[in-house]
Amino acid sequence: MILQIIVYIIIFYLAHNTIKKYRKIHPNEVPGPTPIPILGNLHQLISKKPHVDLTNMSKKYGPLTRIWLADLYTVIISDPNLIREVYVDNFDNFMNRPKIPSIEQSTDFHGTISSSDNDWKRNREIVSVALRKTNIKHIYQLLDYQVDVLIESMKSIEKAGEAFDPRYYLTRFTMSAMYKLIYNKDVPKDEDINNGEIKDLMKPLQQIFIDSGKGSIFDVLEIGRPFYKLYLKYINKNFIKMLDYSRGKFKEHLKDYNPEVQRDLLDILIKEYGHENEDDILWVLSTVTGLFLAGVDTSSTGLEIMLLLLINYPEIQEKAYQEIKSVMKDRSKVLLSDRQSMPFVVAVLKESIRYLPISPFGLPRTTRNDMVIGGKFIPRDSQILINYHALSVNEEYWENPSEFNPLRFLKSDSNPAYIPFSIGNRNCVGANFANDEMFLALSNMILNFKFKSIDGKPIDETQCYGLSLKPNPFKIILESRT
Ligand code: HEM
């Protein structure tokens, strides 16, 4: 009898799941590949490069492509005008993030990255104001110090005749910058970020990236959700570990907290949200955790890509060096105020992350109501993703997109397909900070060193799929320019 009931439930579930995916929802629905029950189109995305697979699909189905990620109806956008229509013109309908279990389990949808509606608006305002240079000016000045530490480490590696590991040192740099911004504390110069005190933050952060890069089918498979939530609560506690780390820093901060003096971003958040009510504290901790998640790996991946490309294109490396040298004259350090005088270096930065985009899909959004975009019907509760790879290879917007050519950004400063930080009111809140830290690190590295590959051959430009699109790990040779 019990067996019979189970069989009926399974048959009912399969029938329901199949009808849901096959029924026509609108005469102008978004086209996409045929799904299968339960998995939807997931089986078509199991190659190592789903962003490239989806770019190929968009050539077949158009700039709006529908795929089923198991039970989640997802629309991939690959045209800048449609992205504008969605993210700017119809912002209110597309402002929120989908409610996936791994986020619910950790922050209960608190914090900048995952909150919605008015809660998000309030938080976003607080974080945007806090990140304005004038509010934590001294922290921005201290970005210079983080660059000094980076260059110092590179100099000692070069002197010792060792190979330089860009991933480790650039992550150390972006992590230290974020740490300073949030906690007003320096990561000690000689601390190994994978083993020192900061490992309690680094390890779960890295694990979340590994897990999210693989993607969990249970985030998108409705029937598995209850078990998945238990797994996240009792077994995979990486988000919780990150929150716990922030809670420790939060308690330390409260010991000498003075609402009149804002030492760092954490103080600003404590002042805005308070420190007594557990829900308010969760807002503070989730916001901080979100900034580490969004702001460390992205910028370090960008810098890693830039170093790789400078090695593969030595004439561009030389041209950038000559530009910096001509501005520096006898000075030994590039400052943010030099940026305007270094258009070629800025063009190298932009072209690097155009040519090899940092993020495959940015962060997902969801639809509040049914809506027609570009003549196609998008149902409410759909997930929306931008395909950054498709944008970067779009021949309508880029001449010879497969060519690495910074000069394209000198000819014309703006291109609607160059939106690495997304657009509209919910674009990347850390875009200025990221551009500042990447510019400072890049220009000072070029000023101090010539970079070469270990075997004199070009480095593999293949990007490995994950939350960010990293190249395969590589080491490089540094030659001092000073
Ligand atoms: C090169 C580095 C970076 C890239 C390419 C990047 C890109 C993005 C993208 C594409 C989004 C999604 C926006 C959307 O939904 O439309 C985003 C969101 C976000 N980024 Fe960045 N980001 C970078 C660095 C940073 C840094 C350094 C910080 C922190 C200082 C940061 C903090 C955030 C936050 C908090 C969000 C969520 C914004 C919200 O939901 O309101 N990002 N970023």
Image: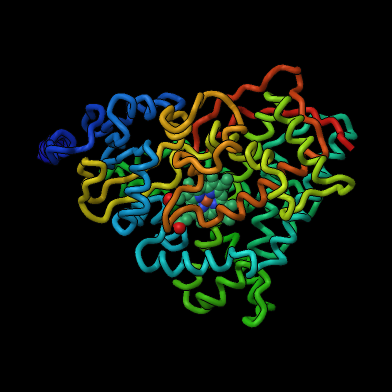
123 shown above or below 85: below
Instruction: Report the front residue among 96 and 258.
Output: 96
Which quarter of the figure has residue 117? bottom left
Which quarter of the figure has residue 472? top right
Instruction: Report the front residue among 407 and 393.
Output: 407
Instruction: Report the front residue among 467 and 367.
Output: 367
Relative image position of residue 100 (x, y in whole percent): 36, 50
Q: Identify which residue is drawn at 46% across, 28% down.
A: 393
Instruction: Report the front residue among 339 and 36.
Output: 339
* Residue 480 located left or right of residue 168: right
Q: Identify which residue is drawn at 90% across, 38% down.
A: 482
Residue 241 visible at all: no
Colouring mode (rainbow / by chain / secondary structure / one colour): rainbow
Q: Quadrant of the N terminus?
A: top left
173 shown above or below 179: above
Q: Identify which residue is drawn at 26% across, 50% down.
A: 381
Q: Identify which residue is drawn at 29% across, 24% down.
A: 60
* Residue 198 located left or right of residue 229: right
155 shown above or below 199: above
Extreme residue toward the front, this view: 411
Relative image position of residue 97 (x, y in whole percent): 37, 53
* Residue 246 located left or right of residue 261: left
Residue 259 visible at all: yes
Q: How many marks?
A: 0
Relative image position of residue 89 (x, y in whole percent): 33, 54
Relative image position of residue 348 (x, y in whole percent): 64, 36
